[in-house]
Amino acid sequence: MSRRLMIGIFEEEADILGVAREARERGLKIVDVYAPYAVHGMDKAMGLPPSRLPWVCFLLGFAGAAFKVWFEYWTTSVNWPVNVGGKPWNSLPAFVPITFEVMVLFAGLSTVAAFFLVARLFPWRRPRLIHPAVTNDRFALVLEETDATFDPQRVEQLLRRFGAVEIEERVEEVAR
Amino acid sequence: MADLDLAPPPPLIATSKRLAEVTEDVCGALERRAGLLWWAAFLAAFSLLALGVAAVAYQIATGIGVWGLNTTVGWAFDITNFVFWIGIGHAGTLISAILFLFRQRWRTSVNRSAEAMTLFAVICAGIFPVIHMGRPWLAYWIFPYPNFRGPLWINFRSPLAWDAFAISTYFLISLTFWYVGLLPDLATIRDRARPGWKKTVFGWLSLGWDGSYRIWQRYETVYLLLAGLATPLVVSVHTIVSWDFATSVIPGWHATIFPPYFVAGAIFSGMAMVLTLMIVARKTMKLEDYMTPRHIDVMAKLVIVTSGIVALSYATEFFTAFYSGNPYEQFVFLNRAFGPFGWAYWIMVGCNVLAPQLLWFRRIRANIPAVFLISILINVGMWFERFVIIVTSLHRDYLPANWAGYVPTPVEVATLLGSFGLFFTLFLLFCRTLPVIAMAEVKGVVAHAQAERRHAS
């Protein structure tokens, strides 16, 4: 399988935002946008749904806290109870600080791990740079030429109208 | 109201910068050879580090009897240094997480170096409790792990165990936060580097980052979540450090004001350290366009606020002692101000309460050498604050027969100097290897400012 892509390179934040919005309104398929920084409002322009990573954060944080409360209870009042200053075996208020720390640790590390996993960011991944300056000062809009209704000339006009400095058509192999 | 100043504030960053110029300014500094100034600083820091390593090796080989501690003053220099360094770290998290949640965009030029400072300060802090154990090779006993002694678990009711968890969590979360923030900039360095070992190393570190917005969107979410987690975390860390003292029954330590007092003091001392480092870094690395007088101005204002909280805490402690009617409480505070360690108390008040008041004047906030001097004074004052809290509360306890003095030995002083050596060695290496300014964030601010200006004209 292969697909044809049309790539427009831009220099300004306002241009890339405008062109992405317009392309979506015209029903063109936006494969991705590449930017040197997180452009504010681009998710709306591209119509991306919000990320589900907060759920990972919440659930794993909750799981970490629950595990820690159980563990502190089990070690101090079931497995090997030790009398410390005559305090009750199960002194729950004293368990709060470590429970909080473990919750933060689980939530934070698992959110980042989940992010690396879903974004497929691994040390051995070779970056596929759409343009060499996309991590420096250029923005790129990548459209897929879906079917016969895709009119390359009209799309090219659209890209030019928003100040594209380079336009390129590329055939990309897609692993299925 | 003769000269009411209605002029708009000076810009945060010289906004005429183009995006490529930001990359050039920040990465260019890493690609040039290190200057003479850097080498001189590095040599000095590294010598101190070597001195510290020698001192630590000596005291581990001989035993901590080489310190000036006695049965009355069981905590002194080491715990002072521990609390001091942990406190320094807190400003980094304030800048990176709390100011991010408050959408303070000025933080973008200083957050990277402030976060690095946090990590290095926590490393320095972690050394002290470990060497205080006397048998540092058994330091892992503080964590619960299945063992053949029962299994005998740790005492989860002890603030020292809480502390171990708080500080390890703080270090790991700060490291993660810092690394996630670095990702886009590591990719920028990778794409600038010529093929070779540098490109390979940064290629691995940047995890194949390609600037895709689908990744950017998740990145922003993760960054927000981490900031949300780090904010209560940083408050919890120094709260738990203060509980090391406050849960004891020592007059002078056993106070409910300790958690907020310690957290405010931590941010106060950390801000002073950020100012110290920033004023040096902007000059030596030619980053005056990014770390502008406006940054120094806002940070000086934060110093005034936290100094006020610290001053209020000092006063509250005295009032509580007076109002308690408890003779032991009252004695400790009178002894603190007018006893044998009174000089340390008045250094603390002079540096932490009086000196920062000069920052109320705009002319002084704009005078960079003056701000630098005040920031150094605050660093000194905050070190003395911890010394005063720890030593003056201990050295004259309930039984006058047990009263003792405390004088640090050269080994202890060398260890303190060594921790400064470690801190500055790490910081100087960081300045030469990683982008000291969060390029991806600064670019967002620059582009936004330019768009607004075009919109206005």
Image (cartoon, rainbow, N blue to C red):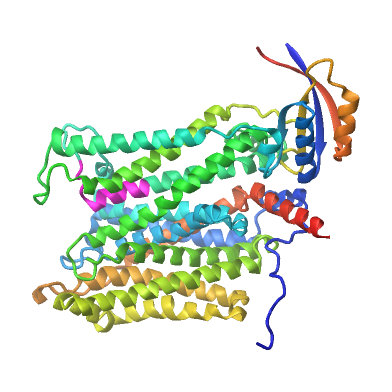
Q: Position of residue B236 (x, y in %)?
A: 36, 53
Q: Residue furthest front?
A: A25
- Residue under the image location 28 percent in, 37 percent down: A68
| Left or right: residue A59 compared with residue B258 | right
| B47 up-or-down from A152: above or below | below
Report the front residue among A170 and B220. Answer: B220
Confirm whether residue A131 shows in the render. Answer: no
- Residue B413 is situated, as x and y percent measured from the top left of the image, at 35, 66
Residue at (59% x, 59% y) in the render:
B39
**Rendering quarter of residue B416:** bottom left
User: Residue at point 50% right, 60% down?
Assistant: B45
In which quadrant of the rendered image does the C terminus of chain B lie?
bottom right
Horizontal side of residue A45 vs B402, given as left or right: right
Q: Nearer the viewer, residue B447 or B137?
A: B447
Q: Which residues are magenta?
A: B154-168
Q: Please say whether residue B1 is visible from this viewpoint.
A: yes
Give the tally of numbered discs. Answer: 0
Q: Quadrant of the N terminus of chain B?
A: bottom right
- Residue A92 occupies which quadrant of the picture? top left
Which residue is rendered at x = 27% and y = 78% of the image? Answer: B319
Q: What secondary structure is the magenta-colored segment mainly?
A: helix
Q: Residue B269, position in %: x, y?
A: 44, 66
Residue furthest to the bottom in view is B2
**A51 displayed left or right of B397:** right
Is residue A153 rendered magenta in the image?
Answer: no
User: In the figure, is residue B234 to the left or right of B143?
Assistant: right
Task: Pinpoint residue B258: horizontal percent, then vertical percent.
Answer: 30, 65
Indicate yes or no whether the magenta region holds residue B165: yes
Compared with B310, B338 (above or below) is below
**Relative vertical location of residue B447 with respect to residue B342 in this rendering, above or below:** above
Which of the two residues, B54 or B382, is positioned nearer the viewer here? Answer: B382
